[in-house]
Image (cartoon, rainbow, N blue to C red):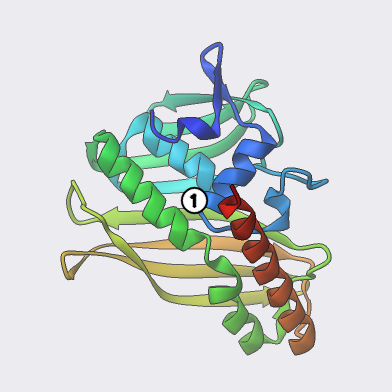
Amino acid sequence: MVFEEFYTGQDGRICISADQASRFAKDVAGDFNPLHNADARRFCVPGDLLFALVLARFGLYQRMTFRFHSMVGDNALLHFARRDNVFTVETEGGKVCLEAEPGGDVTKDESVVEEFARRYVAFSGLNFPHYLKPLFEEKGVMFNPHRPLVIYDSMAFSLEELPVKEPDVEFAGGTLDVGGKRAVVHFEFRMNSGGKTVGTGSKKLVIGGLIPYDSQLMDDTITRFNGMKSAYESGKQKP
């Protein structure tokens, strides 16, 4: 199965260490959310890694809807199951962390599945600052950089046909709806291949602990974000 470097098999289940999850977040998704740092006090496995592993296990369908129900911590034993027409990722105790509902044709060609997953995940990892900052500015709010709480709620996509080859995933707009200290974010995206649109999709985030927008604080947060990214990439290049 693809993405094998990001989990360990154990008694028919898989286990994802904090180090494996953090490497996926940074190396594949370009995601430097502090919650995905291996030493984070509130560490959680990136939802995009679970998404990629579901595709690797069950295949890529023309239409898929993913709903994230709970966060996964370090070294949790996970079981991938199919219940009726729903794929689930469950903990050892039976708690459902993720549900995926498929539809239409399917391909299990590993090269197609991996390429699609990597390209979507690379797009998904651009949440901040690329897509969120303009929405924060528009609405006059932002997350608290000292206690960022950005939760991946759900995503869905629909492809015109399979297989889809080397799709470019393109941002197609977003909205941020504020309710008190909480906001719901929707991102729309298109998938293009061979010069034409071959699919569309959407992604939903929930942000907690909102504070008033502060341009200096936002600039400082982005500077730290870019600094962490540069330091990590420079470290990887050392012999």
Disc 1 is placed on an element classified as helix
Q: Residue furthest top?
A: 11
49 relative to 17 in the view: left or right: left
66 relative to 93 in the view: left or right: left
Q: Give how far across and how far down residue 175 sits, in percent.
A: 53, 77
Q: Give how far across and how far down residue 134 sits, in percent.
A: 58, 83
Q: Nearer the viewer, residue 73 or 25?
A: 25
Residue in the picture at 69% in, 44% down: 44
Residue in the picture at 53% in, 60% down: 125
20 relative to 208 in the view: left or right: left
Number of numbered discs on residues: 1
195 relative to 225 in the view: left or right: left
Picture quarter with the N terminus:
top left
Which residue was labeled with disc 1?
28
- The crowd level at tag 1 (other Cα within 10 Å; few <14, some 14-19, many 20+) is some
Q: Amino acid at mark 1?
A: Val
